Amino acid sequence: MNVSARNVFKGPITALVDGAVNAEVELTLAGGDKIVAIVTEGSVKSLGLAVGTEAVAYVKAPWVMVLTGEADVHFSARNQLTGTVVKLSKGAINSEVSIKLAGGTVVYAVITNEAVLELGLKEGVKATALIKASHVILGVPA
């Protein structure tokens, strides 16, 4: 199956916290990085989600926010993934930013060219990808 989401993260579910309406699901990626998703309890049941189950997390690149420098603000985004910018692909209006995490996973973000300049982004710069857990779509192999 092909999807339009630029970020495709695969790994086992390593934590699952059930709630009345939603559940918090944590995937651990091959390099040890973690992605947290918030899904409905209906999705937990219909997808058969459980600790140990292999799953795939999808995140569209425009849903990823980028932060540089030391944060003097706390964010509500559950996923705060810090790494190093390994590639910038500039377009007419937006740029794709590739951030490699310590575990080897690459996170892609699409942000404006103006934001790239304001953040001082270039290869080798430390950056953090912020992803709200509600922006993570989960799937399981058929």
Image (cartoon, helix red, strand yellow):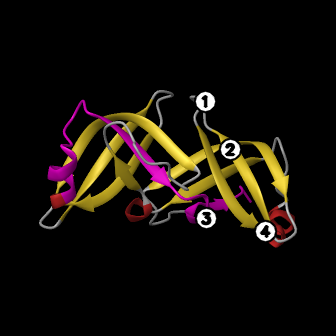
- Label 2: element kind: strand
Q: Give the crowd class for mark 3: few <14, some 14-19, many >=20 residues within 10 Å.
A: some
Q: CA distance from mark 2 to mark 1?
A: 9 Å
**With 2 as the anchor, is 57 left or right in this view?**
right
Q: Amino acid at mark 1?
A: Gly
* CB-based contact (under 8 Å), mark 2 and mark 1: no
Please tell me which of labels 3 and 1 falls first in the chain. 1
Residue labelled with disc 3: 134
Q: Amino acid at mark 2?
A: Leu
Q: Give the crowd class for mark 1: few <14, some 14-19, many >=20 residues within 10 Å.
A: some
Q: Quadrant of the N terminus?
A: bottom right
The residue shown at (46%, 30%) is 104
Residue 48 pos. (x, y %)? 85, 59
**With 103 as the anchor, is 40 left or right in this view?**
right
Please tell me which of labels 4 and 2 falls first in the chain. 2
Residue labelled with disc 4: 43
Q: Quadrant of the C terminus?
A: bottom right
Residue labelled with disc 2: 27
Point out the frontmost of discs 2 and 3. Answer: 3
* CB-based contact (under 8 Å), mark 3 and mark 1: no
Residue 37 pos. (x, y %)? 66, 56
| Quadrant assignment, res 107 | top left
Whether 106 is drawn above or below 1: the answer is above
Q: Amino acid at mark 3?
A: Ser
Magenta-tinted stretch: 115-142
Residue labelled with disc 1: 32
Please tell me which of labels 4 and 1 falls first in the chain. 1
Whether 66 is drawn above or below 139: the answer is above
| Quadrant assignment, res 61 | bottom left
Please tell me which of labels 2 and 3 falls first in the chain. 2
Is 124 in the magenta?
yes
